[in-house]
């Protein structure tokens, strides 16, 4: 994305030009692919962690692929696209489906547009050259104006198909979402039965009154409170605990280093002492003192940044501090649970059944405007943005408008920093300015580095900052959960991509092509624009080549990420905890910043479909490569950290309307500049039809995107009760078979199996709720015993309230030092030396295949 606008040209695109663009990109893609094929065989942790990693449940893992260079391709190709839905998340499945839908749209566009518009454009007698003869610009408006009707009617067919795809996929998503959220796997989760109310008035920050409002269906109520002091205590406790852990590991490594030196010199290695543990009354650190003198023990200073102040023994100081902090945190947590805190205007209400939670979510909770609203359902405890819950209703409004104004200004004025980078890239031309002649004295190598590498790096950094800034804006605007933050970012970043990457680039490309000619002959503006606006598509042909081959190959190979991971794991993980955390945590796709990039590519393709249809072919290839790269990564590499319950999908589908509207407006403008009245009127009529279609499906579908219908909820409850009754009446065996019968969709539409065309044209019949239930996972977890009493009690307390004292993890050594440290430190804070040892090379070693190291925590499905 960082090179957008850097390679625009006014020259007509030729086959040679495309080859010159394709050759280096194909070469880099081949290098990336070779790296992937070689490393995939040996670096299983980085290229196939989902096949074996112990931190994943067995139901979340993917089947291993063959290790050969190419033998894995067949089994990978045969894997079902529903695999992520069964083993990962709804978001991951729908992301892949969205890429596949984009490929289908572009491919069908080629099939529709190319057979008609290529010959119409190529024989248009417009005088265009090279690849431009295949675009609208090659039609002579004076003698061949009737050909514009071909563009009009083909645009009708293609854009009609795109709108139908949006409608069809929206229906598919609604049915899938309903089946997924109403399945026992989701409906029994506490997040599916809990509603978050924002801007709750003071009088309703009371559990008794809330129970009176919502009735006997309420199970638990969490009234959020100010935890600023407790947050600081927990943060300080954890900071001191981690400092103690690092110091303990450092002490063990120092002692082991001395032992190994002694061993090389022929001395004792200390293993004899290992069999006899230090006496219970032995002085703290006495075993370590045999190898590490007092002055070499880990120390730190108490002043600013640890650089100034009194020097203290780190281990002894941390133990003393934890003797104070651990009881202080425990007392503060008990005090909060007792209700002794300042309340803030947000409340979590858990209901016994999902249907009750949905009813509370869909009804008006308070008689005054902007009170107890907005409401959110499906928010998991781990994704709550607790700082946003403190915001009052009027602050939320002010913040929202301020953030929208800031993002608008960011999008509009982003050209300024990009222009500065552009100036740097042409720094040698600045030497002609009188006060910048000193630039000529810079060595040519340095000047080449500044004008070549620096602008690319600077622009890449600038572009990567945009989604980060937008996520920060989302939190500042008061979005209460990370899923809402991602959805906000998806909208904002798409607006940025659409305006900066597409519209401004297109406008400046067309303007640069005709600006001088218009200045010389203003009367020629209409003919010049109609001829040259289509030529702006030439840049995007190169852009799709770079994106499709180069970027897709880098996404698959992850070469840079592999190098960073290896370096961090080998050299910057000095404790067993750091090793495990780096090893066990999978990378995740950030939906809010990834989806808009591909949505924008689709919008560009849709826009130029009727003007320069050749682009559809390159878009099809590019998006296909992206689909394959992400398919592999989602199946075998990445995990889902933020769950939007699939809402990224309809949002991305709706954003495709931007491409349709822009395309229709562009064609109306081009017909106007070409003075083609008939096609102009027809396109205006189709624009009106598009707007009416858009309004209609929004009004019909929007309520179903965010709410679950009561009839399906009641039906799901009935079937669950029926299965339970079967178990009690006929025994577990018969009950299980009944459950399997329901999950296998015996109630789906009976009769002859529908063909592809019938399924495509009637999604409301062949992709309905009952059919979608077959895709939903039914046996991943035991839905009857999801939570312990403690987990359910603490679910929606702020993190600092439910935060437990951390367990320290140090390696076991051959000298018995770790045993004494565990005994002495364990009096203050939990600590263990199991599951990791110090090797004869003084390196940490742990069993990477082990399922549960000491610090492993079972994933809770909130």
Image (cartoon, grey):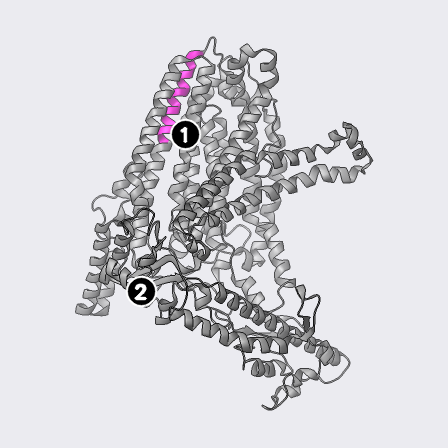
- Give the x, y percent position of residue 216: 22, 63
Q: Give the crowd class for mark 1: few <14, some 14-19, many >=20 residues within 10 Å.
A: many
The magenta stretch spans residue 76 = no
Residue 101 locus on image (x, y percent): 40, 39
Residue sitting at 42 percent across and 21 percent down?
116
Image quadrant in which the C terminus is located? bottom left
- Is residue 157 a member of the stretch shown in magenta? yes
Question: Looking at the image, is 762 positioned above or below residue 577?
Answer: above
- Numbered range of the magenta stretch: 145-161
One can see residue 626 in this view: yes
- Label 2: element kind: strand
Give the CA distance from mark 2 to mark 1: 48 Å
Per the picture, the main secondary structure of the magenta-coloured stretch is: helix
Q: What residue is disc 1 on?
A: 660
Q: For the view shown, which residue lies furthest in the right direction? A: 441
Which image quadrant is residue 760 in? top left
Dot 2 or dot 1: first in sequence order is: 2
- Residue 12: in sight, yes or no? no
Judge left or right: residue 791 versus residue 48. Answer: left
Find out whether the residues at labels 2 and 1 contact each other: C-beta distance under 8 Å. Answer: no
Report how many numbered discs are placed on residues in the image: 2
Please say if 150 is above or below 762.
above
**Residue lying furthest front:** 203
The percent position of residue 362, horizontal first and vertical second, equals 27, 49
Give the residue drawn at x 41%, y 45%.
397
Residue lying at the far left of the rendered structure: 729
Give the position of the N terminus as an image quadrant: top right
Camera-side residue of 42 and 419: 419
Left or right side of 403 for 187: left
* Residue under label 2: 220
x and y, in percent, of residue 271 in the image: 66, 85
Q: For the view shown, which residue lies furthest in the top direction?
A: 143
């Amino acid at each position: 994305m960082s090179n957008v606008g850097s390679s625009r040209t006014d020259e007509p695109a030729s086959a040679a030009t495309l080859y010159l663009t394709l050759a280096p990109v194909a070469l880099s893609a081949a290098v990336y692919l070779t790296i992937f094929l070689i490393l995939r065989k040996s670096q299983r942790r980085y290229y196939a962690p989902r096949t074996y990693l112990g931190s994943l449940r067995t139901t979340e893992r993917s089947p291993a692929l063959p290790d050969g260079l190419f033998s894995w391709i067949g089994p990978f190709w045969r894997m079902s696209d529903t695999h992520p839905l069964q083993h990962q998340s709804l978001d991951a499945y729908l992301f892949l489906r969205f890429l596949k839908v984009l490929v289908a749209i572009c491919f069908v566009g080629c099939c529709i547009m190319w057979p008609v518009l290529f010959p119409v454009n190529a024989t248009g007698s417009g005088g265009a050259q090279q690849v431009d003869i295949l675009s609208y610009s090659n039609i002579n408006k004076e003698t061949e104006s009737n050909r514009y009707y071909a563009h009009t009617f083909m645009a009708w067919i293609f854009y009609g198909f795109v709108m139908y795809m949006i409608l069809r996929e929206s229906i598919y998503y609604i049915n899938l979402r309903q089946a997924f959220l109403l399945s026992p796997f989701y409906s029994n989760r506490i997040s599916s039965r809990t509603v978050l109310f924002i801007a709750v008035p003071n009088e309703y920050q009371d559990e008794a009154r809330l129970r009176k409002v919502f009735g006997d269906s309420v199970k638990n109520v969490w009234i959020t409170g100010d935890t600023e002091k407790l947050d600081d205590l927990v943060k300080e406790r954890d900071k001191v605990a981690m400092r103690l852990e690092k110091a303990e590991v450092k002490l063990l490594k120092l002692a082991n280093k001395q032992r190994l030196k002694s061993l090389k010199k022929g001395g004792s290695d200390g293993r004899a002492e290992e069999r006899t543990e230090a006496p219970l009354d032995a002085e703290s650190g006495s075993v370590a003192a045999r190898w590490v003198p007092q002055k070499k023990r880990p120390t730190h200073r108490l002043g600013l940044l640890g650089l100034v102040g009194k020097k203290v023994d780190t281990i002894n100081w941390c133990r003393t501090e934890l003797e104070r902090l651990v009881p202080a945190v425990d007392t503060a947590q008990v005090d909060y649970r007792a209700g002794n805190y300042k309340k803030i205007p947000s409340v979590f209400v858990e209901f016994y059944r999902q249907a009750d939670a949905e009813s509370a979510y869909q009804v008006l909770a308070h008689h005054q405007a902007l009170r107890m609203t907005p409401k959110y359902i499906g928010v998991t405890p781990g994704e709550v943005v607790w700082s946003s819950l403190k915001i009052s209703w009027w602050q939320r409004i002010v913040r929202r408008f301020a953030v929208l104004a800031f993002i608008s200004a960011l999008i509009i004025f982003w050209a300024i920093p990009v222009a500065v980078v552009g100036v740097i890239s042409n720094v040698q031309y600045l030497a002609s300015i009188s006060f910048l002649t000193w630039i000529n004295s810079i060595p040519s190598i340095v000047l080449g580095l500044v004008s070549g590498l620096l602008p690319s790096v600077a622009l890449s950094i600038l572009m990567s900052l945009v989604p980060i800034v937008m996520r920060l804006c989302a939190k500042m605007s008061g979005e209460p959960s990370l899923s809402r933050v991602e959805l906000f970012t998806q909208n904002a970043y798409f607006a940025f991509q659409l305006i900066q990457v597409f519209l401004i680039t297109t406008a400046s490309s067309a303007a640069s092509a005709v600006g001088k000619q218009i200045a010389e002959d203003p009367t020629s503006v209409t003919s010049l624009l109609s001829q040259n606006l289509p030529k702006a598509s030439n840049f995007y042909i190169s852009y799709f080549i770079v994106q499709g081959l180069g970027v897709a190959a880098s996404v698959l190979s992850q070469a840079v990420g592999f190098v960073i991971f290896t370096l961090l794991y080998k050299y910057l993980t000095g404790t067993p905890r750091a090793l495990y955390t780096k090893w066990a945590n999978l990378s995740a796709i950030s939906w809010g910043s990834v989806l808009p990039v591909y949505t924008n590519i689709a919008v560009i393709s849709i826009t130029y479909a009727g003007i320069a249809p050749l682009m559809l072919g390159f878009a099809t290839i590019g998006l296909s490569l992206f689909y394959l790269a992400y398919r592999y990564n989602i199946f075998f590499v990445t995990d889902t950290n933020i769950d939007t319950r699939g809402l990224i999908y309809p949002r991305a589908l709706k954003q495709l309307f931007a491409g349709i509207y822009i395309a229709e407006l562009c064609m109306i403008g081009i017909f106007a500049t070409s003075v083609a009245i008939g096609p102009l009127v027809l396109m205006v009529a189709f624009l009106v039809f598009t707007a009416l279609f858009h309004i209609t499906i929004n009004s019909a579908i929007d309520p179903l995107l965010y709410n679950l219908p009561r009839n399906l909820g009641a039906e799901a409850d009935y079937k669950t009760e029926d299965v339970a009754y079967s178990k009690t009446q006929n025994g577990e065996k018969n009950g299980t078979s009944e459950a399997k019968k329901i999950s296998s969709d015996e109630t789906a539409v009976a009769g002859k199996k529908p063909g592809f065309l019938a399924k495509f044209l009637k999604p409301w019949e062949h992709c309905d709720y009952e059919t979608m239930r077959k895709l939903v996972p039914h046996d991943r977890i035991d839905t009857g015993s999801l939570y312990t009493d403690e987990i359910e009690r603490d679910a929606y307390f702020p993190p600092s309230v439910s935060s437990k004292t951390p367990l320290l993890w140090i390696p076991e050594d051959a000298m018995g030092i770790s045993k004494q440290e565990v005994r002495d430190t364990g009096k203050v804070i939990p600590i263990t030396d199991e599951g990791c040892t110090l090797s004869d090379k003084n390196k940490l070693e742990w069993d990477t295949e082990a399922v549960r190291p000491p610090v492993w925590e079972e994933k809770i499905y909130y």
